[in-house]
Image (spheres, helix red, strand yellow):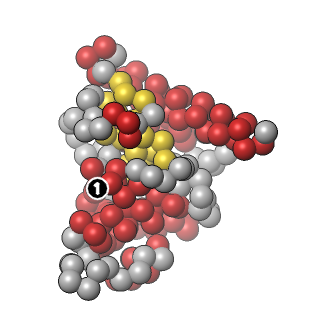
Amino acid sequence: MPITTLTEFHHWLLADDSTGTPFVLLHTASDGPLGCTARVASQLNEFDEESGGNWIALTSQVVHAIASDPAQRRLLGVDEVCPNCPPTSRCGLKKVFSAIARRGRVVFDDPLALEATKDDPNGFHASVGIPPSAEDFHIILNPARFHARCLAPLIADSFLEWTANRQHQSAA
């Protein structure tokens, strides 16, 4: 489900406590603000049986709105930003991206989200096109070799296999 307003964000935030569940971070060259992220979230809502349809695609605009409002930051448990930085600075936005990622079941496509979450073990990183750094990604897809409608299912299926493998490894 694409999230474009704070009201929609609040509905997702209060829907259930999915803290610690995995999230997806995309790197796309240009697909519009919610293009591939919304399609991946939709695929995961359809095929991730454990999620209860609670996957969202979050725009950078909503993240900026959250970062700029102290009450929204408190809802996420984000402490105050650096004293010399405005809340929507790189530092403040990275804290918000990180807090939302810890919540799980979210799909991002923002370079700051990558910076904020690249070492988070719950993050599945997929690139559609050439990424800035290949070692930061689980899967890299060449969009010239796939029809656009195939990209989101490939990413979602790869993510679901990745999570199943993680669960299998932790059980062993």
Relative vertical location of residue 49 with respect to residue 139 in this rendering, above or below: below
Return the residue nearer the eye: 110 or 120: 120
Residue 32 in the image: x percent, y percent?
23, 40
Q: Residue at x 33, y 71 (%)?
A: 66
Extreme front residue here?
135
Residue 56 in the image: x percent, y percent?
45, 50
The residue carrying pointer 1 sits among few (fewer than 14), some (14 to 19) or many (20 or more) residues within 10 Å by Cα, namely: some
Q: Residue at x 40, y 45 (%)?
A: 25
Residue 28 seen in this snapshot: no
Q: Quadrant of residue 88?
A: bottom left
- The residue wearing badge 1 is 112
Quadrant showing the C terminus: top right
Q: Residue at x 52, y 29 (%)?
A: 158
Extreme bottom residue here?
83
Q: Is residue 13 left or right of residue 17?
A: left
Name the amino acid, label 1.
Leu
Q: Is residue 111 left or right of residue 37?
A: left
Return the residue nearer the eye: 147 or 117: 117
Residue 97 seen in this snapshot: yes
Residue 35 in the image: x percent, y percent?
30, 38
